[in-house]
Image (cartoon, rainbow, N blue to C red):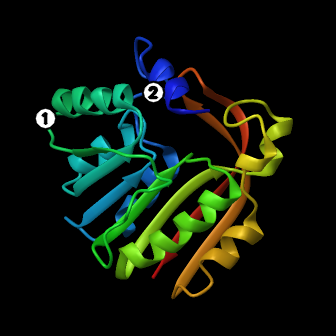
Amino acid sequence: MDKTFWNERFGEPGFMYGDQPNDFLKAQSFSLTPGGRILCLAEGEGRNAVYLAAQGFDVTCVDFSESGLKKTQQLANTHGVSVCTECADLTHYEIEHDAWDGIVMIFGHFDEDLRASLYQRIRKGLKRGGTLLMEVYSKAQLSHGTGGPKSIEYLYDKQELEAAFSDFSSVSIEELTREINEGAYHQGLSATIQVKAIK
């Protein structure tokens, strides 16, 4: 699933994962510092970033798909909010140190090496007291086939995430099976992991 794949997918008419925020993010956004600086990673078409901007946060979102970021700006304009977009590959993206009140990553799926590097950059990027919010598909998602990568190497397990953020002051990581209704490509009963971690 390279840049060409995502540009083609996000180049299709409409919003491939819907234009509404992820349920977990919406439920947990109260835990983010009001008006704080929020970084959304692998943000795609911008549904979560635009939601947060509408709640008064200062939002920057990063994705390597130009067509996805174009839709992000269209969605922001529709809602009358401002979102900063950065087109970058997370393999090389430098997260500004001690700069972010919150970092959000919803269904960002990468190989093991990139995940390990990204965890380190997230830890450095969050301010003390900053919050990480993540929802990702677990390895059990392969048996559901209702969204996400088709290769197990791009899926997550709870132990990996617990180890990655064990030095945070507060960590809640929950594995669950839940119904998801997010556009054409996230539909049905799904196995996910939800992370709320405070540095």
Quarter holding residue 194? bottom right
Quarter holding residue 30? bottom left
Residue bearing mark 1: 80
Residue bearing mark 2: 18
Q: Residue at x 28, y 27 (%)?
A: 70
Residue 174 point in image, percent of width and height? 68, 64
Q: Nearer the viewer, residue 113 or 99?
A: 113
Q: Give the residue type that dot 1 points to.
A: Gly
56 in relation to 15, above or below: below
Identity of the residue furthest to the right in this view = 143
Quarter holding residue 195? bottom right
Dot 1: few (<14), some (14–19), or many (≥20) neighbours within 10 Å? few
Q: Nearer the viewer, residue 199 or 174?
A: 199
Quadrant for the N terminus in the image: top right
Quadrant for the C terminus in the image: bottom left
Residue 102 point in image, percent of width and height? 36, 67
**Marks 2/1: CA–CA distance:** 18 Å
189 in relation to 161, above or below: above
Secondary structure at numbered mark 2: loop
Q: Give the residue type that dot 2 points to.
A: Gly
